[in-house]
Amino acid sequence: MRTLFTSESVTEGHPDKICDQISDGILDALLAIDPNSRCACETTAEPGAVHIMGEITTAATVNYIEIARQIIREIGYTKPEYGFDADTCEISCSLHTQSADIAQGVDMALEAKEAIDTDGLGAGDQGMMFGFACDETPERMPLPITLAHRITRRLAAVRKNGELFYLRPDGKAQVTVEYENGKPVRVNTVVLSTQHDEDADPLTLRQDMIERVIKPCIPAEMLDAETKYYINPTGRFVLGGPAADTGLTGRKIIVDTYGGYARHGGGAFSGKDATKVDRSAAYMARNIAKTIVEAGAAHRCEIQLSYAIGVARPVSIYVETAGTNTIPEAEIFRWIERNYDLRPAGIIKKLGLRAPVFAKTAAYGHFGRDDAEFSWEKCDPKALAELKAMVDEFIAKGGTYVDTAFVYHDGASETALREALVERYPRNAYTLATKCLAWACASKEEAQACLPTSLERLGVDYIDYYLLHNLGGARTVKFDEYDMWNYVAKAKADGLVRHVGFSMHDGPETLDEILTAHLEVDFVQLQVNYLDWDDPVTQSARCMEVAAAHGKPVIIMEPVRGGRLANLPERGAAVLAAADPDASQASWAYRYCLDLPGVLTVLAGASTLEQMQDNIAFMKDFRPLDPQERAAVDRVQAIFHGMHLIPCTSCRYCVDGCPQHIAIPNLFALMNTKQLYHDWNADFYYEDVHTGPGRKASDCIRCGQCERICPQHLPIRQLVADVAKEFEKPQA
C-alpha cells in the first residue's frame, strides 16, 4: 500500500519564528544570570512593532528590548525596505510576575505538602505531553520533517553567506514523502516559498532553489523524474515577515515537534522555563522514546506523560509502539518507571534545563538535532548491556562487594544495578553498599527518604553496608541536624541495613571526633592510596591509625587516586615496569592498599569491561608487596611529590552543583596533564573540554557552590580562574 505524508518547516525569518526566538532569547538571558528564573514569555510581531508580554519572576535584570532587537538583527531584518527593521521597529513590554496561585504549586508540590514525597517542585501546568521517535532516519525522526528542516536551514545558510544574495529572511519548505507499507521510498513533492528582493528573476530563483537548496538536502535516490517542485507558487514573495503576517509565539508547534507525524499535547515551548512541564516533560518523553528506538525495543515509539498542576509525579504514563515493539510494552513501561525520575525536578536535573540552552531550539525544530545543548537527544542504550557484561565478569571471577550511592548519575546507578545485578543473581551472591548525602538534602524528611528510595531503586529488602557519605565540617552538622545517626541505627535494628558506617575525606582529627561521638559505627570508608599516604591534607596513614585505635575496619576508596595511579607519567611507569613488566599500574595501587592492616575491602572503579578485567586479573594469585616492590612504589610517590597537582578525585559533586554546568574535573585534569605528561595539545581545551562535556572556565560566576560541596575542600574558584588564564588564549 502506498501513502503520502507531508511536513512543513519555516525559516528563522518567519514571523512566528521571530516571536519564538525572542521569547527563548529572553529566557536564556534570564537563566544565564538566575538559573531559577520562572518565565512564560510570549511575543507577538506585526508591521513595525513587537510586543513582549507574559509572566516572569527572576532575580536577573536584563534589557528585554535590546535582546529583541539583537535577535531581529541576527535573523537578517536590517533594512527598512524589508518592511520590518531591527533598529526602527517599535518594541514594547507588558510583563508581570508569576501568579501567586500558580507559584505556590510550583514552589512546593502537593506530595511535599502531604509528606508523601520530599521533592519540593510541583508541575508548572496541567496537561498531556508526547514524545516520539522512529527509525526512519539516523536522527530517529520522521523523514518528512527531517528533510523540511534541512531545506529551511540550507535556505538560511545560502542567504547569510551571500551565495544567494537576493534572498530575504522569510521562507517555508514543505516535503511530501511517499511510503510503501510504512517505509519511505521517494519524495513525491517539495514546496518551497522564499522571500526575495524586488528585482529577483523568477526563473533564476526557481533554478537556484531546486539545484542549490533542495537537491543538496535530499538523498539523490529519493528524487526522480516524477518528483514535483513548487517554488514560490504565487509568483511573488517580496513582502514577508511581520510586514506581511502577524507573528505569534508557539503557533508553529507542529514544526517544532514531529511535523504532524506524531501527536502533540500541552502547549507551546518557546519562552517557557523548565518548570513548565508542557516543555520539559515533552523533552523527557522524546528522550525516552528515542532511547527505546535506539535500543531496538521498538521501530517507532510514542510516549505520553500527563500532569496535574502543583503535583510532582505524572498522573499517567502511556507507551504506544504501533505493534513495532520487540519486547512487551508492559516491560517497556516498567523500565521507564524504574529508570526515569519524571518529577519536574528530576527532569530538570537529568537534562540540565536550568542553563541557557533554549535559544537554538526556537528555529528548525526542538528534536532530531546533535547540537551540544540538546541534552534530550542524547541517549546511550548500550550502557546497560555494558554494565551487565561487567557484572557477569565480576561475579564469575569471585567478586562480591558492589558499591553505589543515592546520587550517582541522579539515581540511575541504583536502578541500573537493579536490572544488571539484583534481577539476575541471587541475593546471597553479592554484598551491596550504597550511600546517603544527607547534607545535600533540603530537609530532614528528604534526608531520611534516601534509604527507602535506594531500597526501592535497587529492588532489595536490605542494604549490606549503608554509609553516611562525605562527613566533615558543616556537612557533619547536617547529619546531626537531620537526626541521621538515630535514623540509621533504627534502620539497622529493623533489618533494613546490616552494617552502618560513614565515609570522609577530612583528616584524622575529624575522624577521631566522629568515632568518639558515635560508637555505633561498624566501619569507615577512607581515601587511601600510596600518593595520599603522607599527604599533609588527607593524612591517610594517620587516618588508618585512628580507625585501628577505635577498632573499626576500613573500606578503602580512591585506591588509584581518581585514575592517576593507573595512568602514570612516563618516569613513574618506567619504575614499575622495571620491577614487574607484566603488572598493570592499577594493580600496584590495589596491592599497596590490600596489604594494609585493618582493611575490609578496596573499591576498584571501572568504566569498561576491559578495565574490569584488568582490575581483577591480578587477584587470582594475589601476593603482598615485597620490600623491593614497596621501594619501587616509594620512588613513584617521590616523582609525584615533585609536582603541584590539583588533588581532584573526579567525584563530580561540583558539576552537579554548578549552576553553569561547568565540567570542573575535566578542566583540572587538563591542568594536571600538562604537568604529568608534557605531551598535551592546547587546542584540546577548545575542541573537547569546553565544547563537549561542559562549558568553558571563564563562564564561572564565582557563586562558591562548588567549594561548599567539594570533599577535598579545594579552592575551586581560584583554580578555575587559573585554567581560564592558562588555556583561554586567542587562537592562531
Image (cartoon, rainbow, N blue to C red):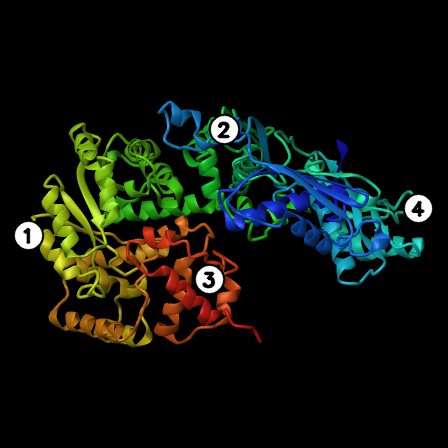
Q: Amino acid at mark 2?
A: Pro
Task: Out of 540 and 387, give the one closest to the viewer.
Answer: 540
With respect to residue 145, does 678 lie above or below?
below
Which residue has dot 1 on it?
549
Does residue 497 appear to the left or right of 106 in the view shown?
left
Does residue 165 appear to the left or right of 389 in the view shown?
right
Q: Name the N-terminal-most of marks 4 and 3.
A: 4
Could you give the CA–CA distance between mark 1 and mark 3, rounded to whole angstroms?
Answer: 44 Å
Q: Amino acid at mark 1?
A: Ala
Task: Out of 615 and 115, give the one closest to the viewer.
Answer: 115
Among the 4 quarters of the image, the one containing residue 649: bottom left
Residue lying at 89% horizontally and 52% vertically, measured from the top left: 206
Q: Name the N-terminal-most of marks 4 and 2.
A: 4
Does residue 317 appear to the left or right of 217 in the view shown?
left
Q: Does residue 432 appear in the picture of this structure?
A: no
Relative image position of residue 453 (x, y in whole percent): 33, 32
Which residue has dot 2 on it?
328
Residue 697: numbered disc: 3
With respect to residue 678, does 65 lie above or below?
above
Q: Residues within 10 Å of mark 4 (few under 14, many from 20)?
A: few
Q: Residues within 10 Å of mark 2 (few under 14, many from 20)?
A: few
